[in-house]
Image (cartoon, helix red, strand yellow):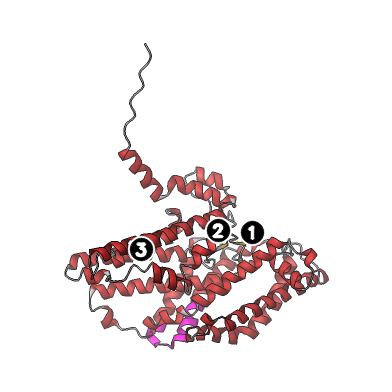
Amino acid sequence: MDRVDQGGMPANRAAAAGEPPVSAVSAATGVVGLAGLMIALAVIAYLRLPLAAAALISLTATFLPMVLWSVIVEKVWKNPSTGLDFSKPRSHEETMETTKVKLIGLFVTWVIICFLYFVLANYTIKKFGFYYLILYHCALPATAFALIYVYYVDMHMRDPKDALWHFGAWICGRRDETDREKLLDHMRAWAVKGFFLAFMVPIVPENMSAFAHFNWNAITASPVAWFLAIIGLLYSIDVVFGTIGYLATFRLLDSHIRRANPYAEAWLFALICYPPFAAGIIGGALNYRIGGGDWHFWLADYPVAIVVWGILLVALTALYASATIIFGIRFSNLTDRGIITNGPYRYFKHPAYVSKNLSWWLMYLPFLSKIDAASGFRACVLLAAVNCIYYLRARSEEKQLMADPDYRAYSEWIAEHGLLERAWRWTKGKFAKPVPAMQAAE
């Protein structure tokens, strides 16, 4: 991910001053998006809107404030990492030479993705109806927008022969002009968008059900209901921001995909955490919830413990959601879209993974079983195996990012200042055996 030093301070100087390298996205971007979303959720709850309308309104109310802030206040289109130079636009004739190739590549990409949705059995179920409805109604406007957007951006690109151009050239039979790595990068980037958009978009209206059918009496019925409602709200916020991240890959907003992860192990460890692959792995062979119960089942007779446990779960879920919010419009898996060093990333290298995996232990208490002690032990082993998958997922992501000098600077900084790293050094120092003093030779 390319970091834009918006403060004008080199990464090493920022780190030397005790501050992390400057983040590619300001915290304000996520804050204005969150404000827009909260207003939208209040309107949805008050008007009890249909789920489809609620989903579209929540996405729009979150996306537009972040775009306006990024363009008007932060002027991200001027960032060097966009690869754009507005002082030297190319001529119409020169621009059209590359734009035609890019548009061919873009439209062929869309056709291939839609064809795969049509052919693959997993994408034919009713769950994807809302997503396909959006694709159907947006097809013509998206095509018109692409014609204008691709031409305008192409006119101002310093290097117009990007990954999209190389794919278009390959489709046009100009194989001797194509760069294999850029060709593969285009395919990987759109595989990420195609897979995760189909996963994320249908979840948005599902999550809106809690707001469109808001029931205050049900929420206030017990402390557990309060905590579950807050956790549900935080997960809904995460889904909205995540969906926008996969949609908003625009060079003009400096949110384009610089590079998709090229390593097979990264794709393996990421995809097995999501449907349909998760059903056979985390939801199948590694299902740690068989014979167990949720936290409020086990703690039902301990009201103080219920409150403490609920607060801890809300705190962990808030950390998880904030790790998505801080990306603004740039969140996505398996891609490189700018190094984030503020928000929770100032304290943890992988805040989402840390909070999510800890919350599972607190939420499901796998060491307790309705069956027997052996089942509880088995559940602990399986959840530990799931934790290992996320650890390997994090390491495989770092393998790609460590090629970026900005991420290396951040990695060095967090190794010195991160909360977990500091705790580990303190623990080692606390329990380390004292080294005997050296005696001078006589």
Hey, which quadrant is residue 434 in on the image?
Answer: top left
Q: Residue furthest front?
A: 374
**How far is disc 1 from disc 3 in space, using C-alphas?**
43 Å
Q: Is residue 48 shown in magenta? A: yes
Q: Which residue has dot 3 on it?
A: 382
- Which residue corresponds to the image point at 48% horizontal and 80% vertical from the top-left? 202
Tell me which residue sits at (40%, 68%) in the image: 285
Which corner quadrant holds the C terminus?
top left
Answer with left or right where residue 25 lies relative to residue 94: left
Of tags 1 and 3, the one toward the viewer is: 3
Asked whether the residues under the numbered discs 2 and 1 touch, taking CB atoms below 8 Å apart as contact, a structural biologist would say yes
Q: Mark 3: which amino acid?
A: Leu
The stretch in magenta equals 44-61
Give the labeled residue for mark 2: 24
Q: Earlier in the sequence, mark 2 or mark 1?
A: 2
| Nearest to the observer: residue 304 or residue 393 | 393
* Residue position marked by numbered label 1 in the rendering: 81
Q: Is residue 442 magenta?
A: no
- 36 sits to left or right of 264: left
Q: Earlier in the sequence, mark 1 or mark 3?
A: 1
